[in-house]
Image: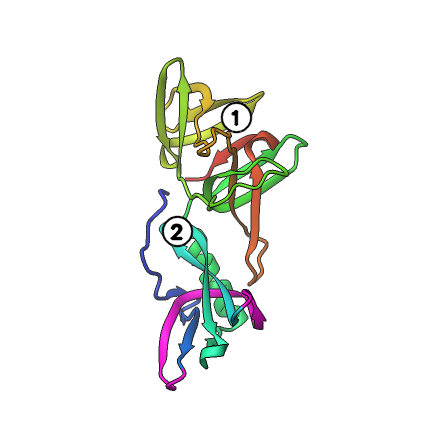
Amino acid sequence: MRAHSYAVLTFCVAAGALLKADTVWTKRATGTEELCRRDVIVTSQDGAASYSASSTYYRVIVRQLQGSVVVTRVCVANKDKGESLRVEKSSPDERRGILVGWMKAGYTADITDVSGAKFTVSNLALDFLAPPNVTVIGLSASAFTFVRVKRGERENPIQFADIDTIQVQDGTIDVRLNAGGELIGTLVGPTTASGLALVPALRGIEDLGTPAIVDFEMPLSKMKMIAFKH
């Protein structure tokens, strides 16, 4: 099955029941409430904490389905201005149902690493990370659902939807297509303003059958095989 893109996931149906995700509200000093995030899963709630020299904030970190990948978003309220955050949380069963719906919306693959260990990962996306022990200012997470393969002087973008398997060996990737045929070359990725090459990695969610989000992230160099499950 091809991955489907949902701009907003209002509800999903599991076992005949409507499942509600978490909602975060910002309460202003006037007493009014404004919606910060809905259809999310809250992963962290901070009490009042100083994130700058001049102000104290409340912070709630959430995960949200965006297209076919799950992204991180943050709600912040300034305590010094009389603001606060209110969270309407779903039940564990509801969160589990929401996660199942999210995972069906994205790309799923069986990944084998160089040691032979196997992982099933949903909401798969290609990211480019800073090299180990290197800090890159302004680097944000990517969420590519295609690979760009360079062969000779030509670069070929290939969507995840068209890929059967990717084999990785010594910096080369062998992309085999659902329609037949293959393309062998090097993966093309972005560089920083200083020309530093970023490290390609796959990230997503492992399904361990729990209501909790179990993040997966692994550099492509640590992988041997990626087999998409369409």
Q: Which residues are magenta?
A: 29-53
**Which residue appears farthest toward the front when viewing the image?**
54
Which structural element holds mark 2? helix
* Residue placed most toward the observer, 25 or 59: 59
Dividing the image into 4 quarters, which one contains the N terminus?
A: top left
Can residue 95 be seen here? The reply is yes
Disc assigned to residue 105: 2
* Residue placed most toward the observer, 25 or 181: 25
Q: Residue at the location (49% across, 23% down)?
A: 173
List the residue tagged with mark 1: 167
- For the stretch drawn in magenta, the main secondary structure is strand
Residue 2 location, quadrant:
top left
In this rendering, would 25 be left or right of 8? right
Which structural element holds mark 1? strand
In this rendering, would 87 be left or right of 12? right
Residue 106's place in the image compared with 148, above or below, is: below
Tell me if residue 30 is in the magenta stretch: yes
Dividing the image into 4 quarters, which one contains the C terminus?
A: top left
What amino acid type should be assigned to the residue bearing mark 1?
Gln
Structural distance between the alpha carbons of marks 1 and 2 = 24 Å
Residue 33's place in the image compared with 119, above or below, is: below
**Where does the image place residue 73, in percent across and percent down from the top left?**
45, 59
Tell me if residue 133 is in the magenta stretch: no
In this rendering, would 61 be left or right of 1? right
What amino acid type should be assigned to the residue bearing mark 2?
Ala
**Where does the image place residue 15, in percent across and percent down from the top left?**
44, 67
Number of numbered labels in the structure image: 2
Disc assigned to residue 99: none
Colour treatment of the image: rainbow
Can residue 179 be seen here? The reply is no
Residue 51 location, quadrant:
bottom right
